[in-house]
């Protein structure tokens, strides 16, 4: 809606990319309105990827206010993966 209000049409040469699992509702809304939106998944060794994922989770939590549940879920998953036994 805001993109349309600012004159940004779905045919504009702009792509919206978001981390899979973060603000999915925004990606779905953009895609449903005809904008080019995609999800990306970082990959690599766990000790290389986790700092990036934690930063993204913190940014999303700060920006959106109410997503501390997502951050807690990420922390639990990090713990589960680093200490599986």
Image (spheres, grey):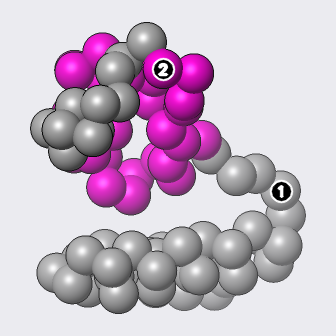
The span from disc 1 to disc 2 (Cα, nearest Å) is 33 Å
Q: Nearer the viewer, residue 76 or 30?
A: 30
Whether residue 37 appears in magenta in the rendering, the answer is: yes
Residue 5 against residue 70 in the figure, above or below: above
**Residue 16 at what x, y percent from top left?**
49, 38
Does residue 38 appear in the picture of this structure?
no
The residue that appears at 20% across and 45% down in the rendered structure is 2
Q: Secondary structure at mark 1?
A: loop
Start and end of the magenta stretch? 12-40
- Does 29 sit left or right of 7 as displayed? left
Which residue is under mark 1? 44
Does residue 22 appear in the picture of this structure?
yes
Q: Are marks 1 and 2 in contact (CB under 8 Å)?
A: no
Figure quadrant of the N terminus: top left
Residue 39 against residue 32 in the figure, above or below: below
Q: Secondary structure at mark 2?
A: loop
Q: Nearer the viewer, residue 67 or 48?
A: 67
Q: Residue furthest front?
A: 7
Count of number-bearing discs: 2
Q: Nearer the viewer, residue 59 or 42?
A: 59
Q: Which mark is residue 12?
A: 2
Q: Which mark is residue 56?
A: none
């Amino acid at each position: 809606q805001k993109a349309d209000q600012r004159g940004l049409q779905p045919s504009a040469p702009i792509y919206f990319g978001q981390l899979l699992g973060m603000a999915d509702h925004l990606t779905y809304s953009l895609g449903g309105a005809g904008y080019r939106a995609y999800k990306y998944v970082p990959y690599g060794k766990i000790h290389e990827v986790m700092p990036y994922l934690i930063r993204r989770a913190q940014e999303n939590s700060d920006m959106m206010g109410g997503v501390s549940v997502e951050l807690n879920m990420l922390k639990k998953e990090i713990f589960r993966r680093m200490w599986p036994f």
